Image (cartoon, grey):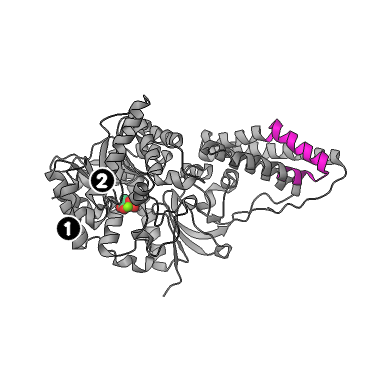
Amino acid sequence: MSDMQQIQGKSIGRGIAVGRMLFYKKGGRQIRRTYREDSDAELKRLADAVEVADAQLKALAEQAAQTAGEENAAIFEAHRIMLRDEELHASIREIIQSAKVSAEYAVFVAEEHFSEQLSLLDDEYVQARKADVQDVSWRLIRILNGFEEMQELKEPSIIVAEDLTPSETIQFDRSLILGFVTTQGSANSHTAILARQMSLPAVCGVSVDPAWNGRMAVVDGDSGLVLIDPDEENIEKSRQRKREEAQLRERLQQLKGRPAIAKDGRHIAIYANIGSVEEAIEAKENDAEGIGLFRSEFLYLEGRDLPSEEKQLLAYKAVAEIMEGKPVVIRTLDLGADKQARYLELGQEENPAMGYRAIRICLDRPEIFRTQLRAIYRASVYGSVAILFPMIISIEEVRQCKRHIAEVKAELKAENIPYREDVQIGVMIETPAAALISDQLAGEVDFFSIGTNDLAQYTLAIDRTNARVEALADMHHPAVQTLIRQTVENGHKAGIRVEICGELAADTGYTKTFLDYGVDTLSVSSPYVLAIKDAVIHAVS
Ligand code: PEP
Ligand code: MG
């Protein structure tokens, strides 16, 4: 038995990395209050440190421009401006002079103050700026303390850290970084953006351990899975996948702009699954004909509180606009089970996957649901938006959802807020119950989207997060396949469209089967769009 450990995180940069881990330790986060009589000397130390920091940031901006593009160099230019921020300086000076403390302690206190104030504002942009203020302050503190700037990378490594700031990310020698694994981070953080820009696999949401330093790992930036101390078989498999991916990527580029027409002349729409606005850009670049699944819950996982209607509107509108009139299917909140937002305090459950989650939360907490529905309807005027309800098991649930929609529309009308009447409504078929009553559900909605991840989990009674039983999750199982086939048949009998958005849609081994079932749309992660298009074009019946 190998001691391999498997950890599921959140993918924030695609691709696969195999190599040794370097555990990145932050230099000197402990700042002690130190008494300094000579305030002028401290002010001089501060001024000198600002000059050194400015020179460092200038060099970083140049380095970033070369390795990650002008856009990312702008992060460091912004830090240079922040470094000279008069408000921040006034605050540091005041602390040095009135409290008679060292410059580094004054910077530390001023930064804490600033961050605290910014924390009160529930705004993603402000939160990102907070990270920048912290980054700039810690640069100053490191310089004042004479800490070593960076741990040196001596061999190609996977960087593992609790958290990485943009400047830490960019300072590593690009040619020696294989990927990133962090505890903190989100798809919208600058660090994640940099990782994607550098085409590096990155996974966040992993509880990292300093004892991993120097040990082997596989980072799967497509699935978000991290293997610690992988066995030989997994290492070889991953290396092989890396080689194949590189060759395939080259070849698939030629398919851009071509529709996915199967041998029998049918056009299969290939859409992308996304979890953020940035991923919509990636979807578009990868030639997706629409967004088949916008996992809206990631908007709820990023903040400390429920996202406001305005914040959601901005995200949905941005995706609708990026897709320029192409379909964008927004799935309503699917929290619970493996996706927990601490502020909701959902509590511990014996069987969370079969517990209080997704549509069950929404129908139980209509104020949360209605805020989201309002945001989706308001965004509908900016493109072609559709709504998808997760974890449905009954007709009654769909009718309740539709009643909320009718009320939200009436509210918007009364408030003179524009929305589109023709927003399509769909349900996820991801429980055996939904698949078995799909003939009846089809009469209620405009489309079906089959979630094979949960459908297989519930049909086979195999927890999708439990590595011990993963090998038993046979997608070929006739029970799973029969439910998929029947859902397509029932959908088509009622004249509605049927999409598959679970991970199985991206498995080219099933493309022909799905074509035979008559599936209309396959929605996959962006890096797979062209591969699935290729599989549709070449599938032979
Ligand atoms: C699914 O269950 O197949 C699905 C697409 O939804 P999620 O993976 O987000 O549960
Ligand atoms: Mg699901």
Rendered-image quadrant of the N terminus: bottom left
Where's residue 444, x and y in %?
20, 42
Where's residue 216, x and y in %?
49, 63
Q: In the displayed structure, would residue 229 be above or below residue 16? A: below
Quadrant hosting residue 416? top left
Where's residue 362, x and y in %?
36, 47
Residue sitting nearer the eye, 24 or 450: 450
Q: How many numbered discs sit on the rendered protein?
A: 2
- Considering only order in the chain, which callout, 1 or 2, is on the residue closer to the N terminus? 2
Q: Nearer the viewer, mark 2 or mark 1?
A: 2
* Residue found 48% across the figure and 61% down from its top: 217
Magenta-colored stretch includes residue 105 = yes
Q: Which mark is residue 398?
A: 2
Q: Going by the picture, which residue comes out furthest to the bottom?
A: 1
Where's residue 392, x and y in %?
27, 51
* Badge 1 element: helix
Pointers 2 and 1 in contact (C-beta within 8 Å): no
Q: Which mark is residue 482?
A: 1
Say if residue 271 shows up in the picture.
Answer: no
Residue sitting nearer the eye, 23 or 518: 518
**Horizontal placement of 433 versus 227: left or right?**
left
* Residue found 69% across the figure and 39% down from its top: 53
Give the residues in magenta.
Answer: 83-108
Q: Which mark is residue 59?
A: none
* Residue found 18% across the figure and 52% down from its top: 437
Quadrant hosting residue 38? top right
Say if residue 509 shows up in the picture.
Answer: yes
Quadrant hosting residue 2? bottom left
The kind of residue tagged 2 is: Val
The kind of residue tagged 1 is: Thr
**What distance separates the C-alpha of mark 2 from that of mark 1?**
23 Å
Q: In the displayed structure, would residue 477 be above or below residue 402? A: below
